[in-house]
Amino acid sequence: MNYPFVRLTPLFAAAALLFASLPARAQFAGAGGLVAPAALPSPIFTGALYGAGLGYGMGYGWGTQWMQNPYEGYLNGAANITTANAQYQQTIQQARLTREEARRSALETRRQSILERQWELSLQPDPEQIRQQQMMKSLQRSRNNPPLTEIWSATALNDLLRAIQTAQSRGTNGREVPLSSDVLRHINVTTGTAYGGIGLLRESGKLTWPFVLQQSFFDDGRKRLDELLPQAVKDARSGPVSAALLNDIRAAQTRLQRSLDAHVADLTPSEFTEASRYLRELKDSLRVLQQSDVSKHFRTNWTPQGSTVGELVQQMTREGLKFAPAVSGDEPYYTSLHRALVDYDAGVAQLTSVPTTR
Amino acid sequence: MCKHFYRMLAALTCLAAASGVLSAAESAPVVGQLLTRDGTLFARAKPSQDWQTVPAKGEIHAGDLLVGLPGAVIETSNGAVDLSLLTDLEKNSPYPVLEAAVSLHASTDFDLDFTLDRGRVDVTNIKKKGPARVRIRFHDQQWEAILSEPGTRIALQLYGRWAKGVPFHKQPGPKEVPTADLVLVVRKGQVDVTHGSCCCIMSAPPGPAFLHWENSGAAEEAAQKLEKLPDWVATERSGSERAQRIRKYVEILREKAVASSPREATRAMVKSSDPNERATGIIFMGAMDDLEGVGEVINGTKYADTWDRAVVVVRHWLGRRPGQDQILYQRMLDRRGLKPAQAASVMQLLHSFGDTELAQPDLYTTLVKYLDSDVLGVRGLAHWHLVRLVPEGKTIGYNPLDPKDKRDKDREQWTKLVDDLIEKGKLPPKQGAK
């Protein structure tokens, strides 16, 4: 609030008081050199008297409210200035009060806002609670016939794995659900450092090519990979794969991808999608070969083991593993494992819900 | 001498064949007449023949395939039953039918014996008294309905389509067929419906008024109760802007068909500058099996909306019954000169993708790659799927009919968008639980 008018008002008031102390005629002797009239005429007769040229004095002494002599004008002016001054002071005080009121109101608003926020926070669960709720929701979805795609992407399997791991850590083990070694052979696991596991390389690097990629125009890249990959896997079992070999594999893989792109017109969308998917999975599997701890992926520790669900989960907990997505051809095995995990999980849930009697 | 002999023999053979056709057409008994205006019904005696408009009061011969404009009404020769050919004017019926097609048969046991080829029809007992007996044939089914008293009316709707995720097969197995659904609703009165060994006693709402059949299972044994008639049934009362618009353009088609022929009328309409005329033209082109015409639209139209509509019409055509797929595939090889892989791609894209495929990011990148195809059908259909599967790309102005350099720029945008969405985990979209 910065009004120059308000700041200058005291000066104006002082000047007005000084001005009021001068004789009335002198007051009217302004810059223009006008001379104040001897008497101020009554406004009632102003027109007629002016017209008659009788001067201002004719109306003097009539005693009505309209009549003013110079002294009265002086006193009246002085009173007006006093009133103005008082009004000024009052206005200033009023402004101060209003400002104070506004400040108080702002503080109150802020306080209310803080209270509102606190109230909101009191209703809102914290991020950890939200995370827990989401995990629970996801687990429920994974237990109750999730879409097959969630099973094959390993999302549902990992939800169930977490639930069973939690139960096992509390000492609760479900009933034995047997697992066939054939199923486990098609299950990919990961430590989480790579997107997938060894996936397509699990058969000692010998790939099972889909029909579409067995066509003659893919011979070049395919045959080259068939030569290189078993060698790479052999090397990987004992340590890191050499950069030269990895470069050769990458080059062959790129060549195959280019052949596929070049023959898009010769393939139906399903064939092209199938081939693209296989090459993408191959690319993911090859990433494992680039890791320094690649040898662990080919050892029994990091391959799913166990004859029952309980044993499998214990091994995965021990090794810090989780399920990786299925690669082409693994889907039925993933569906089967999901069923087994759900059965085991249901058994655990039954045990935890029934009170033990001693 | 020998040459002359063969010529004469050939001429005699042709004459004999022609007279055979004529006698077949003439000998086909008259089973009804058209009650509505000239040209509200198109008829064809054989697939090899052209469609003709049926005049008002014109005779309907047994065995003719009849495609009706919405509102066409046929009366049986004995004056016992009305058969109305309708459509889904309000877009609110259970199945998105486009047109109605039937063929009538001569029968001494039934007042109306007909095959419902596809679409929506109403059957009404118009006798002065007594029940009307109706035989309804569709797919491999033969149902009998007794419309108990004058005024009794039933609504039927038959629709077929390829189910989601069923791919195209050059040689499909016996179970690889389009799904087919029939709905029967009693609009007025009481009806006894017999199908197989079941007999349903049905009556108009409130009552057991709804019966459903599908080719993947048996028909329901008992009718479902309805409290009131579904809105889609009373199609003749539709007064919406859409219904009025459809009626207006159907009338234009009728006038043109009467003035020339149904085939010429639809072919002229698909070239119109009016999108509604084009839509009506392409729908009835499909209804009358004018694949040549639809193919010309797909390959030659400059209108994206008509292209889109043509795709829908072809998908409807393919879903009518088993075997349509193979007909279209063979035509693309024989008449359009496509390579087998190209024709198979078009066919596959005319089907839809299943959940498993939709869950693979590779499907989306594949579709984007097909935007670059030299075959208009392939790139157009790839785009048709993409805008539906990745709605974020609707703003990209890709048009399969654009010149290549323009298409290439738009395709790059699609590539970027799809890669970006896959990277962010937004594609493939999360699916609902089973």
Image (tube, rainbow, N blue to C red):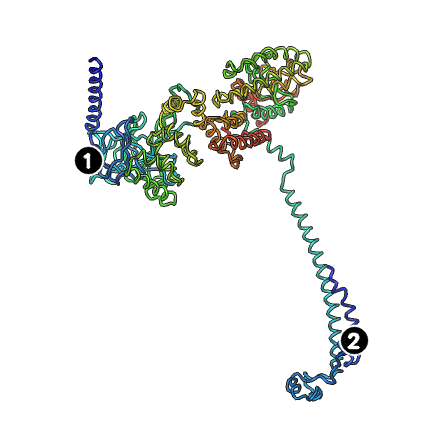
Q: Amino acid at mark 1?
A: Asn
**Relative to A44, is B159 on the left or the right?**
left
| Between B20 and B243, the one nearer to me in the picture | B20
Q: Amino acid at mark 2?
A: Phe
Q: Which residue is mark 2?
A: A19
Question: Where does the N terminus of chain B fall, quadrant-wise?
Answer: top left
Residue A317 found in image quarter: top right
Q: Which residue is mark 1?
A: B78
**What's the distance in space between the residues labelled 1 and 2, CA to CA?**
121 Å
| Between A92 and A299, the one nearer to me in the picture | A92
| Between B48 and A109, the one nearer to me in the picture | B48
Looking at the rendered image, the disc whose residue lies closer to the viewer, 1 or 2, is: 2
Up the image or down, B207 lies above or below A220; here it is: below
Up the image or down, B92 lies above or below A343; here it is: below
Residue B267: x %, y % from top left: 35, 34
**Relative to B431, is B268 on the left or the right?**
left
Residue A135: x %, y % from top left: 60, 30
Task: Point out the residue furthest to the front here.
Answer: B1
Circle 1: element type = loop
| Between B368 and B6, the one nearer to me in the picture | B6
Q: Quick check: can you spot residue B260? A: yes
- Chain letter, disc 1 residue: B
Whether labels 1 and 2 belong to a single chain: the reply is no
**Relative to B293, is B165 on the left or the right?**
right
Q: Residues within 10 Å of mark 2 (few under 14, many from 20)?
A: some
Q: Quick check: can you spot residue A333? A: no
